[in-house]
Image (tube, helix red, strand yellow):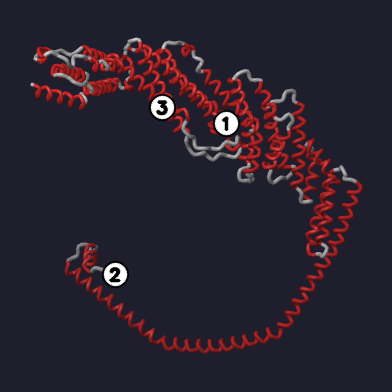
Amino acid sequence: MDLKTFAENDFSPKDWINRAWNISENQEKEIFVANTVTRLQLYMKQLSNSLDETTTQILTSVPRVLQDVQSLQLEGSLLQQKLMTLERQVESVEEETGQSIESLQRIDQLKSRLENAASALREADKWAALATSLEDILEAGIPAQVEKLNELADLVVGMTDSLEVLSDAPDYEKKCTQLELLYNRLEAAISPPFIEALTQMDAERTTPYVCVYRGMSRAASAQRCWRRAAAARHVAAWRRLDAHSLRALTRMLVGDVGRQVEWLTTVLKSETPVSELIKLYTDLLLSLDPSPTKIVTANFKLCQNAEEGISMLTDLKSDIDEFIDCIMRIIDGSAGKENISDTTLKELGKVAYAPLRELMPNYTELQTQLFLAYLNDPQLKQENLLEYSRAVQFIAERSDARLNSAYLRGKKIAGDAIQPYFAPAMETYITAILNLITTHTRHIEATFLSLSARGQHEGVLSEGFSASLILETATGILVDLLVERTAAEIGERKDAHPLYDLFSILDQDAREISPSPSLAGLRRARDTLKALARTILRHPVDVQLDKIPQLSVWYNNDALSTDLPDFALSPQEYITEIGQYLMTLPQHLELHLSEKQAPWQFLAEVCTYTCEMYAEKIINIRNMDPLGTKRCLTDIVYLSSVVEDLGTNVTPALKNLEKSLRAATSSQQ
């Protein structure tokens, strides 16, 4: 029987009895219970006997354990006494040997000083020998053999190392000065052959000289010699060219970049090869004769027209970008290996883009010429008012595409920095169109006044009205165009790599773009045209309304006529003329106005204006008799019916006037 079951914390007698009964092979309950009880009693007796034996053993072993503990305590006390005795002995030994140790330390220091003095004497002798050897070499002349140059490099390295050992010598400063003078003489002596080897790009001859420079800790001087030699070689190649051009220069430099970087890395052992290469090209571009700027300027003067000039500027930027992109590939290839200062990069950028910076002021003039050429339209040479307005509208509708195309083309020349150069050309173009609009507006107005003076009151059928509307539409197109361009171009300047920061390179500030000065002029012109169109449209109404004060039907009517009933009266001619004109407006306005211009808004404005002015004219009539009042009411009713038929409302002023006149008529009766 497994007794572990009885030791479990969650032991359940019922569960145990049920499991035991299930595995009893269906014995009778009495027999199963008797057997189980007997077995459990036997197990309990065995456990009791085991507990008794264990208890007896524990009681027997306790005295022996207590005796062992006492023995351990005694041994611990003895060990503690021995440790205290040993500590006192160690302190005594330390006191006795302290003076001896100090003596040994002083002896060791003295020994070290003697060894240093002996070493210094040996190094001083070695220094003197090396200095003498170097003096002899300088007197005899720098050898040209590679083996001798290698020996010279070892000699220089030895002198530098020897001087470091003598740093505590009393005459250290004197030796430093002497070594510096020797190195100056040595550098002066080896510079010419070193530059010659660099010019010929003879790696075998150059390497020993580089070792000499590095031995003198003058690697920077070696790199300056390399720049002089490389620049001289490029200048000579530049002079040998049959035709000088920026593209030829770019090809020459781009083809040489990889070789120069390899030389700087493998032969000169430069830790900053890309920086040295950038300094070389900066110095080279400044020293070329004829300079790239001079050549480009001369070629620019040969351009026959503005289109050629813009194309040349685009090609110029492309040639410069080819060189800059090559430099950027070298920089990206050394990413993480070399830290190149922004100042070094900006200097190269200014020198490389110098030809473009010189010619950029000409871009504005060239682009202005191209813009103004669009205004040489034969349609603008005719005298017909309507056709001239359509020609201006045609130009306005195409201005957005023309400006966008020109701006994108300009970005190929100066990137985002083109805006300060592009804006004046665009402003001149828009101003020229504004001048056309203003001049034509005056022409329309003069024609309108001339026709009015001759008694021609065409109103909505007038060419001046249609021409004004078309010109107003053209002006609105230009206003929207300028607003959209200003909103699109306003923004913060983005950070760019120093070689691509054309704002700085071209000396242009990234200022916030202000609205075009011509925008205000266009808005004024649009308002003027809007007012002119409405004046022409309302003119036939004004002509008829101006007749009202001179009509005699308002007063001096005989008594018999006064007694006429209202239905016997009919609207007078002036008001019927106005009504007929108003009724013809819808169909004519739909022909002249687009949905955007809201023809019904025009109609409502004319009706409102007619009612307001009619009321004002009637109020100004003096001495209106009863019959005149009836006739006026008849005219008002007629006008009100016309206005309502057109889908608009009679103004409050006219309604109030009608009420007042009816009240006056009633009182007279």
The amino acid sitting under disc 1 is Ala
Q: Is residue 667 left or right of residue 618?
A: left
Q: Residue 445, located in which quarter of the rendered image?
A: top left
Labels 1, 3: front one: 3
The answer to whether 180 is drawn above or below residue 639 in the figure is below
Disc 2 residue type (three-letter): Asn
Tell me, for residue 250, which label it has, or none: none
Crowd class of label 3 (few under 14; some 14 to 19; many from 20; radius 10 Å): some
The residue identified by callout 3 is 523
| 1 or 3: tag closer to the N-terminus | 1
Q: Tell me what residue is drawn at x 32 percent, y 12 percent.
A: 458
Residue 606 point in image, percent of width and height: 27, 20
Q: In the image, is 90 to the left or to the right of 381?
A: right
Q: Nearer the viewer, residue 212 or 643?
A: 643
Q: Residue at x 81, y 68 (%)?
A: 115
Q: Is residue 521 above or below residue 214?
A: above
Dot placed on the residue nearer the N-terminal end, 3 or 2: 2
Image quarter in which the N terminus is found: bottom left
Distance, label 1 to label 3, CA atoms, is: 32 Å
| Quadrant of the rendered image containing residue 48 | bottom left
Q: Which mark is residue 9?
A: 2
Judge depth for marks 3 and 2 and give the one in front.
Answer: 3
**Residue picked out by circle 1:** 414
Q: Secondary structure at mark 1?
A: helix
Q: Is residue 637 left or right of residue 84?
A: left
The image position of residue 490, as x and y in percent, is 47, 35
- Who is closer to the viewer here, 651 or 632? 632
Q: Residue at x 21, y 64 (%)?
A: 18
Mark 2 lies on a secondary structure that is loop
